[in-house]
Image (spheres, coloured by chain):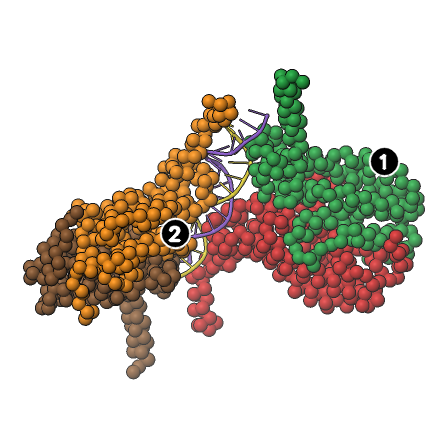
Chain colours: A green, B red, C brown, D orange, E yellow, F purple
DNA sequence: GATGAATGAGGATTCATTCAT
DNA sequence: CATGAATGAATCCTCATTCAT
C-alpha cells in the first residue's frame, strides 16, 4: 500500500472516528446527565460535571443543548420511551391466572425499571415536576397514562374473569402504583442517606405487597366489611 | 384590680405592639417558609423571599433563625415532629379494636398532615435529602424513626391481641407508609401539574387502602398462599 | 424618719444612682471598646459586643457615640492623655547617670505602658492609622512627638554630660523606640497566636536591649569602625 | 527547524494570546492583591477590588485562588517564604567576617523586602494575625520560623568563630528583628500619615542599628556590666 | 434617656453561559 | 467543531445604624 493511500486512509479513519464520536456525543452527554441528575438532583448537578463525566468540555455541552433545562428535558425524553408497546403485548399474551399476571408484572417492573437508573427518572420528575410543567405534561402523556392503562387492563382482566371482586378500578390502579412509587422514592432519597436500619429488601417487599394486595381483592376471600 | 397588676399591665402596654409582633414573627416566618419550601423546594427558595412573604426584611429572618437550614428544621419541628408526643398519647389511649385504630390513625394522619401543607415537607425531604445530609439525618431522627415506631406499635398491638396474623412488622410498617408517601408525592408533584384525569380522592383512596390492607392481615381471613 | 421622706430619699437615691451611671456610661463604653478593639481589631469588633461588655444595649452606644468610628476616636483620645508632663518632670528630676536614666526610663515605660492595655492602643494605631488619617495626625501630635522629645532629651543629656558619644540624635531616638514598638507589636499580634516557642520575656528583653544599646553608644566603648 | 517543532509551535500559536494571559493572570492578581492588602488590610480589601485592579472580573479571581485566604497565602509565598532557600544559600556561602555578614544581611533585607511592597505583608500580618488564626499559623510556619532560623545561624556563626561574645541567641534574634519590624511598621502605618518630620532614612537607620548592635556584641568590646 | 427589633447595604463565593482561540 | 478562560448575576449571611416603644 502506497504511503499516500495510507495517509488517506488514516485521514479517513480519523475522520470516521470523529464523526462517530460527534454523533455519539449527545448520547454520552445524556447518559452522564441521567447519572448525575438522578444522583444529585437537577439544581445540585453542575453543567461542568456532566461534561466531564461525558469526557467533553463545558463548552461542548452547550453546543448540543442550549441550556441545562434543555438537557434535563432531553434526558427525560430519551429515557421514558416506548417500552410500553412491548410490555402491553407481553402482558396481553399472558395465559395464566390474573393474580399470577400481577405478580409477574410487578416482578418485571422491578427488574426492568425499579432496579435500574430509569427509576431515578421518576423520582427526578416528582422533584422537578412543579418547576417544569411542560415536562410534567410530557411525562403524564408518555409515562403515567400508558402505565395506568396497563395496570387498569390487568385489574379489569381479573374482574372480568371473576378472579377479583368488583372494585373501583382507578383506585385499584393507585393501590398497585403506590408501593412502586414508594420504592423508587425511598431508593433515591432516604435510602442512601439513612443508616442500614432503614434498608428495604425490594424484592421481598414487592412480594409481600402483592400477597397483601391479592388477599384483599381475591374473590376467594371473605367479603370486606361494609364501609363504616 | 390590684395596683401591681395594673403596673404590670402598664409596663406590658408600653411594648405591646412591638412584643406582639416579636412573638408573632417566628410563626409568620415558619408559615412563609413552609409555603415556599413546599412550593419551590429548599434550595430554590431564597431566604429573602421567605422574609418578604412574612412581611419582614432579609435581616429579620436571620434574627430568628441562624441559617436557612435551621429555618427548615424549625419548620419540620413545628409541623411534624413536635406532634408525635400528642399522637402517641392519643393512639395509646385508644380502646377499640386494632383495625379501627388503624383506620382512625390514617384518617387523622390525612386530616392533620396529608391534607395540610405539612405533607409538602415529606415530599420536600425526598427531593432534598441527598443534597443536605444533615437535614436528612435530622429528618430521620425527628420524623422517620418516631413515625415508624408509631406504626410499629399499632401493628404489634394487633398481633398481640390476635387481631392480625403474625407478620414481619418492619415490612408491615412500609406497607402502611407506602400509600401515605404516595399520596404526598402525588399531591405535591404530579397532582398540580397534571389534568383532572389524574386527580385522586384522598379520603376514598385511604379508606380503600385500609380495607385492602386489613383483609390481607386480619386473622379472620384465610391464610395467604405459601410464597411461590 | 417619715415614710414620705423615705420615699423622697429613695427617689433621690435612685436618681442619683442613675445620674452616676449616666455620667459613667461613656467611660464604661470606652473601657469596653478599648478592651475589644485591642483584642480583636477595629473591624472585627462588633458594636453590640462593646455595648454588651459595657452592660448597655446596642442603641445606647449610639446615643453616646454617633458611629463606630467616633467611638474608636474617643477610645484613642481617652487613653493617650497627658501622662507626658508627669514623665517629663520625673525624668528631668533624675540625678543619676544617663545610662541609669535610660534603664529607668524603659523600665517604667514597660510597667506603665507596655505591660498595660495602653500598649494595645499603639498597636491599634499602627493597624488603623492609614484608615483614620485624622486620628493618626492626632496621635502624632499627642503621643509620638512628645515621646520623641522625651527620648531626645535623655539622649542629649548623655551626650552633653560626656556619657554618650556624639550621635545623630534622631536616629538614636528610633533606636530606643524600636524595641518598645517591637514588644507591643509582638505582644498584640503574633504573641497570642503563636505557640510557646515564640514567647518573649519582656523584662529580660528590655534589659538586654538597654545593655546592647549602651555598650554601643557609651564613650567607654571603643569607637565604632568608620562606616564602610 | 524540524517539522515537529513547527507543528508544536503552530499549536502553541493558536492559543498564544489566551495562554499568555492565562499564565500572566496569577501574577497580575498577586500583584494587585499585595498592593491592596498592604494598603487597606486583608479584611477591608474586597475580592472584587483585587480583581478589578488586575483587570479581570470577580469570578476570574476565584478561578485561580479558591478563596480570599488562599489568595493571601499565595501573596505571602510569592513575596516572602519562597525566597528563603535563596537567602539561606546566599548567606551560607558568605566567606567574610560575621559582622560583615550581618551588615550584608540587613542591607539585602532592606533592598529586597524592606524597601519593597513585600514589607507591607509583615505589617499586614501584625494587624490581622489575631483575626485569622489560620493565616497567622501559616505565617509563623512559612515566614517567622525560617526567618528566625536564618538570623540564629548568623549569630551562632559569629559566636562559633569568636567574633561575638556568647549570648542568649534567642534574645539576639529578637534584637536583630526589632529594627526591621519597626521599620516596616513605621513605613506602612505612621510614615505615610505623618508629616515630613517623622520620615526615617531607612538605610542610615539600618547602618546605625548594625553599628550599635555590633559594638554591643563584638568580643573586641569591653564586657558589659553585670546586670544591676 | 434606654431599649432591642428591624433594616438593608455590603461582601465572599458559585456556576450557567459565552466566545475568542 | 471543541475548548476552557472569562464573566457576572445570584444568593447566603453579617452588622452598623435607626427608630418605635
In the image, residue A204 lies at what x, y percent? 79, 53
| Residue A106 visible in the snapshot | yes
In which quadrant will I find the C terminus of chain D? bottom left
- Residue visible at 76% across and 47% down? A180
Residue B87 vertical placement versus C132 (above, below): below
Label 1 environment density (alpha carbons within 10 Å; few <14, some 14–19, many ≥20)? few
* Same chain assignment for discs 2 and 1: no
Indicate the secondary structure of the residue bearing disc 2.
helix
Residue A81 vertical placement versus D115 (above, below): above
Asked which quadrant contains residue A146, the reply is top right
In the image, residue B80 lies at what x, y percent? 64, 57
| Mark 2 or 1, closer to the camera | 2
Q: Chain of mark 2?
A: D
Residue D17 vertical placement versus C104 (above, below): above
Asked which quadrant contains residue C164, the reply is bottom left
- Residue visible at 36% across and 55% down? D145
Number of numbered discs present? 2
Q: Residue furthest bottom?
A: C1
Indicate the secondary structure of the residue bearing disc 1.
helix
Q: Distance between the Cα atoms at labels 2 and 1? A: 73 Å
Q: In the visual, does D103 lie left or right of B28?
A: left
- Residue visible at 38% across and 51% down? D142
Q: Which mark is residue D142?
A: 2
Q: In the visual, does B80 lie left or right of E10?
A: right
Q: Are marks 2 and 1 in contact (CB under 8 Å)?
A: no
Amino acid at each position: 500500500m502506497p504511503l499516500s493511500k495510507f495517509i488517506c486512509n488514516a485521514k479517513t479513519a480519523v475522520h470516521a472516528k470523529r464523526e462517530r464520536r460527534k454523533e455519539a456525543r449527545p448520547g454520552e452527554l445524556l447518559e452522564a446527565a441521567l447519572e448525575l441528575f438522578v444522583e444529585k438532583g437537577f439544581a445540585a448537578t453542575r453543567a461542568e460535571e456532566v461534561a466531564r463525566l461525558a469526557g467533553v468540555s463545558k463548552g461542548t455541552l452547550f453546543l448540543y443543548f442550549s441550556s441545562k433545562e434543555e438537557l434535563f428535558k432531553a434526558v427525560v425524553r430519551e429515557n421514558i420511551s416506548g417500552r410500553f408497546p412491548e410490555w402491553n403485548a407481553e402482558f396481553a399474551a399472558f395465559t395464566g391466572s390474573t393474580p399470577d399476571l400481577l405478580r409477574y408484572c410487578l416482578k418485571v417492573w422491578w427488574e426492568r425499571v425499579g432496579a435500574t437508573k430509569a427509576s431515578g427518572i421518576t423520582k427526578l420528575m416528582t422533584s422537578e415536576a412543579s418547576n417544569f410543567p411542560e415536562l410534567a405534561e410530557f411525562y403524564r402523556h408518555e409515562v403515567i397514562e400508558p402505565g395506568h392503562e396497563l395496570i387498569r387492563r390487568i385489574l379489569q382482566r381479573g374482574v372480568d374473569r371473576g378472579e377479583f371482586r368488583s372494585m373501583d378500578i382507578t383506585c385499584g390502579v393507585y393501590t398497585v402504583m403506590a408501593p412502586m412509587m414508594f420504592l423508587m422514592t425511598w431508593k433515591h432519597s432516604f435510602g442512601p442517606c439513612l443508616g442500614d436500619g432503614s434498608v428495604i429488601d425490594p424484592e421481598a417487599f414487592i412480594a409481600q405487597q402483592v400477597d397483601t394486595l391479592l388477599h384483599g381483592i381475591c374473590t376467594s376471600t371473605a367479603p370486606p366489611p361494609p364501609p363504616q
